[in-house]
Amino acid sequence: MPSGLGLCQRSVCSPSSPAFLSRSQAVRSLLLGGAVLTQFPVPVAAAERPPRPLQQAYDSYSDSYDELDDGPIAQLLGLPQLRKQLLRQAHGQVLEVGVGTGLNLPLYNWAHVQHLTALDLSPGMLSQAQQRARASSLQPNISFEQGDVTQLPFPEGSFDCLVDTFSLCVFERPQAALNEMARVLKSGGQLLLLEHTISSSPLLSWYQDFTADAVTRTSKGCVWNQRVLGMVRQAGLSVESAIPAVAGSIISLRAVNRAV
């Protein structure tokens, strides 16, 4: 299995930080209907702080990362179940970009996964993922790599499956990242993506567009109003299934590389 580089820039932070509060409050507002029009979670002080280098930022909160992605709010929204349903479809040679602390590792059907290359920008995140793998006896099936998803050093058609959960929204060049993902997929290979996206609800999509810049500033670069379906198609992939969740603000999709 080739080794290579990948990038994790997930929108994550401690539950006490402005980034966590802005995103969780936004979701609660959306789910509460009328509050969506009156509650705009934009901490000015946080927005004015200069951003730290991404690798340093994610290293700094790698210990508390799971409190957001697998904490009470994630449980309430059903995100762990969405992850599990998506990852059960992975098979063969798998590349996961933005592996983070390895939250997804126990959710794969390892009877169908020959090998997983787990990629992340942050050494701190990768260290947490390696600890999780050792604790679950999965280490022999996984290789861990650090690097940039927009410059994957793999030949075309290297992987049967590519997995990305909640990383695309913070990639600085999301379309370039998707193009690279498509490039390294085999013909017939599949992209499994769980991500923030623009809702089909007019009210909710308006709110997402209205608050997009503020949310990006206060949540480590998360762009929660991306047109994900169109971006995946622009990368040359065929969307086979797309399941909306959380009032359509999150999408779980499977896309296939139909290139010969």
Image: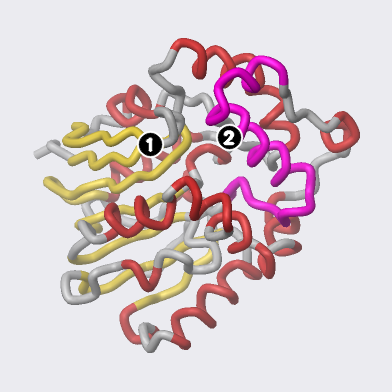
Q: Nearer the viewer, residue 181 or 192?
A: 192
Quadrant where the image shows the C terminus: top left
Q: Residue at x 68, y 58 (%)?
A: 58
- Amino acid type shown at disc 2: Val
Q: Quadrant of residue 233?
A: top left
Q: Is residue 57 left or right of residue 204?
A: right
Residue corresponding to mark 1: 245
Residue pictured at 62% horizontal, 29% vertical:
29
Say which residue appears at 69% left-offset and 40% top-offset. 219
Reading the image, the residue beneath label 2 is 27
Inter-mark Cα distance, 2 to 1: 12 Å
Residue 110: x, y in percent?
24, 75
Residue 29: image tag? none
Q: Is the residue 110 above or below the residue 245 in the image?
A: below
| Left or right side of 30 for 176 | left
Mark 1, residues whose alpha carbon is within 10 Å: few (<14), some, or many (≥20)? some
Which quarter of the image is occupied by the N terminus? Answer: bottom left
Report the magenta residues as a range.
9-38
- At label 2, counting other C-alpha atoms closer than 10 Å, the crowd grade (few under 14, some 14-19, many 20 or more) is some
Q: Main secondary structure of the magenta part?
A: helix
Can residue 181 be seen? yes
Q: Position of residue 122 (x, y in %)?
A: 62, 62
